[in-house]
Amino acid sequence: ADKIIRQAESEVEKLKEVAAEAAEKIRKEGYAGAERVEKEAEGKGWVAENLAKKAASELKKEADKQAENVIREANEKAESILNEARKRAGEISKSGKDQIQ
């Protein structure tokens, strides 16, 4: 029973690591895109620069939102994995106790 839980915890750690890496990649790409938008607008007048800043801000917000969703979904999946492992471990423990009695 303990082995099942340890395996689940190991799986959850890997899942969270992959999610964190994916979230960081999403953020980096989003922020790099925002920076490109702002650089392209440089020297094209204050209107273009102002619009570029607003667009860049939206790109950053969207990247942050997507990254947060990846983390949230990973946490939900992790919780589900752990709950299932606990349930299976409990069933094994219970069946083992029933056999002893």
Image (cartoon, rainbow, N blue to C red):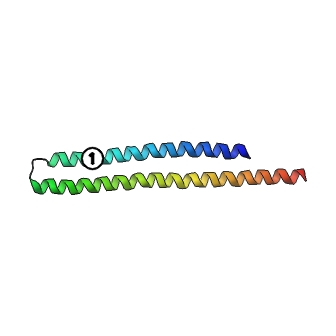
| Left or right position of 101 against 82 | right
Identified at 49% across, 54% down, the residue is 73
- How far across and down, in percent of the image, does residue 8 sit? 63, 46
How many marks overall? Answer: 1
The image quadrant of residue 50 is: bottom left
The image quadrant of residue 24 is: top left
Q: Amino acid at mark 1?
A: Gly
- How far across and down, in percent of the image, does residue 48 sit? 13, 54
| Left or right position of 91 against 76 | right
Few, some or many C-alpha atoms within 10 Å of disc 1 (few <14, some 14-19, many ≥20)?
A: some
Identified at 71% across, 52% down, the residue is 88
- How far across and down, in percent of the image, does residue 57 sit? 26, 55
Identified at 45% across, 52% down, the residue is 70
User: Which residue in the structure is indicated by mark 1?
Assistant: 33
- How far across and down, in percent of the image, does residue 74 sit? 51, 51
Task: Provide the secondary structure element on which disc 1 rests.
Answer: helix
